[in-house]
Image: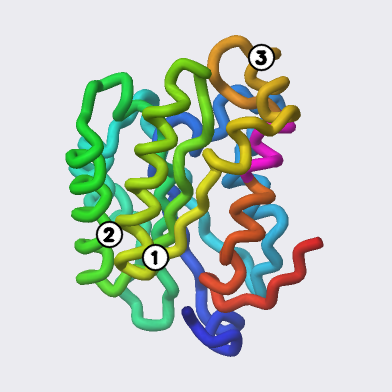
Amino acid sequence: MAPVEDAVSREVRICVVGDELSAGVGDAKALGWAGRVVARTRFPQPAYVFPLAIPGETTTALSQRWEAETARRFSPEPDVDNRLVIGLGRHDLDAGLSVARSRLNLANVLDVAESRRLPTFVVGPPPGHAQDAERLAELSHAFSDVANRRRVPYVDTFSPLVTHEQWLADLAQSGNGFPGQAGYGLMAWLVLHTGWHAWLGLPDDTV
């Protein structure tokens, strides 16, 4: 975590990689959870935030493309604070990936980021279709374990939302598995209250 005084003086660049949930698909305000989080974060100077989402992306695909895409947005200058946010989705289930493979994919990304001295923040997959709940719970737990072993902040969005009435109502209304404004707002709240400001080295002024 960067000291507060460093966060104040340094330019911040954040790349958000993930699937369509990271881009806020289904949100009438086109903010998604990432846009809401940034809007609620009081950066000392304007932050450079780059959403890099690909629809239907698995962790295998993400692990193969994240480094090249983020490298073009990050700065090599020592006074620039480059940071990576990983928004994990549910598509590993659809693709039939084993939990072990999903774990390995995330571990590889985090290990490379660590070797690049790139601070990383991971947001886990939120609940989707009811029939996938058991498998998604297992996947979210696996992702959490991988991140925690590496002391990387991890936001569990599955456990708090799987029985949350507002979340379930939002999914039911959309009918396509995507949350709407309320659902993305819930995800943003979880991110903001699970170490986001501490990770950035900023005072936590959320209410």
Q: Nearer the viewer, residue 143 or 195?
A: 143
Question: Could you tell me the amino acid type at mark 1?
Answer: Val
User: Dividing the image into 4 quarters, which one contains the C terminus?
Assistant: bottom right
Question: Could you tell me the amino acid type at mark 3?
Answer: Ala
Which residue shows up at 55% across the image and 26% down it? 25
Q: Is residue 137 above or below residue 124?
A: above
In the picture, measured across the screen, residue 151 lies left or right of residue 104, that is right
Residue at image mark 3: 172
SS assignment at label 1: loop
Q: Look at the numbered discs 1 and 3 and tell me whether their residues touch, using CB distance below 8 Å.
A: no
Find residue 163 and report its horizontal and vertical position in percent: 64, 31
SS assignment at label 2: helix
Q: Is residue 160 above or below residue 78?
A: above
Mark 1: few, some, or many residues within 10 Å (few <14, many ≥20)?
some
Whether residue 155 is visible to the viewer of this picture, yes or no, is yes
Mark 2: few, some, or many residues within 10 Å (few <14, many ≥20)?
many
N-terminal-most mark, 1 or 2: 2
Between marks 1 and 3, how big is the CA–CA gap? Answer: 33 Å
In the picture, measured across the screen, residue 74 lies left or right of residue 160, that is left
Find residue 203 and report its horizontal and vertical position in percent: 68, 77
Residue at image mark 1: 152
Q: Look at the numbered discs 1 and 2 and tell me whether their residues touch, using CB distance below 8 Å.
A: yes
Residue 115: image quadrant is: bottom left
Q: Write down the region rendered in magenta.
A: 181-187
Residue 198: image quadrant is: bottom right
Residue 184 shown in magenta = yes
Dot label at residue 110:
2
N-terminal-most mark, 3 or 2: 2
